Amino acid sequence: MGNFKRIGVLGGMGPQATILFQQRVVVGITANDDASHVPLLVDMNPQIPSRLDWLLRKEGRDPAPVLADMAKGLESGGASALAMPCNTAHFYAPQITAAVNIPLLNMIELAGEAIVRIVGRGATVGILASPATQQIDLFKNAFAKFDLDVIYPEQAEPMLASIRRIKSQGATVADNDTLNAAAAQCEQNGASCLLIGCSEFSLLANDIKATVPVVDSLDVLVAKTIAFSLAE
């Protein structure tokens, strides 16, 4: 099992989401002993400047330089690839990849590929994510090459409030209700697939009630992380 490639994790956005990512990587391996698991080098940095504040209101500091420095540190620590269990932070993927010589396992692009495998090209995807991802067209731009259209819940503020509450208090019944209401609205507006595009919402993935397929971008990243680490 010594041939596993080490994966560097840009973590802390938020801490619970990073821990959930690690848990799912562990569960995703059929292991006989410790040495059968994927080696992760995790930079758990909750002090990364707020992506939401910077993207939505231009308040605080630009997270890009911090993320680039973290990527450099992970590469120098022996990582063969990078994983970042935060959807919104993928807005800074160009700055991250420019700073290192190892690949970033891009969760947004991987999610698009997964959706096409399930529902095909030309589908309409309901995005359950931070309103910041809509403002910066994160999923719209990435999914265009897959001929996927994206729609968002009509009310952005409850989604943002839920994300902030989960970061500070953990997931609650109110957050579950918010997410299910948003999912139902996207279905009513024509979504043939739903994407959990916020790793805070991944904490509630099992509680979503939907009649269309639901793809969790965190699960897609976990699968790619394991596959990359085990690849010859």
Image (cartoon, grey):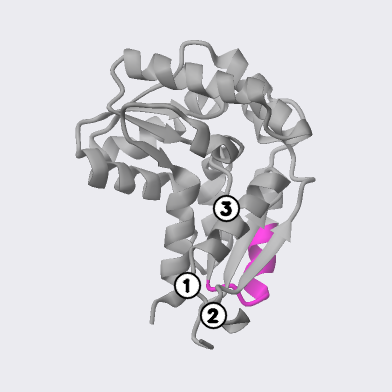
Residue 106 in view: no
How far apart are the alpha carbons under marks 3 and 1? 23 Å
Q: Earlier in the sequence, mark 3 or mark 2?
A: 2
Residue at disc 3, secondary structure? loop
- Counting from the top left corner in percent of width and height, residue 129 is at 52, 29
Indicate yes or no whether the magenta region holds residue 148. no
Q: At 77% from the left edge and 46% from the top edge, which residue is drawn?
A: 46
Tag 2: residue type? Ser
Query: Dot 1 corresponds to which residue?
Result: 30
- Counting from the top left corner in percent of width and height, residue 146 is at 25, 40
Query: Dot 3 corresponds to which residue?
Result: 84
Q: In the image, which disc is placed on residue 36?
A: 2
Tag 3: residue type? Met
In the rendered image, the vertical position of residue 75 relative to residue 48, given as above or below? below
In the rendered image, the vertical position of residue 170 relative to residue 10, given as above or below? above
Residue at disc 1, secondary structure? loop
Q: At 49% from the left edge and 59% from the top edge, which residue is drawn?
A: 104
Crowding near the residue tagged with mark 2, few <14, some 14–19, many ≥20 C-alpha atoms within 10 Å: some
Q: Is residue 219 left or right of residue 14?
A: left
Q: In the image, which disc is placed on residue 80?
A: none
The picture quadrant where one finds residue 162 is top right
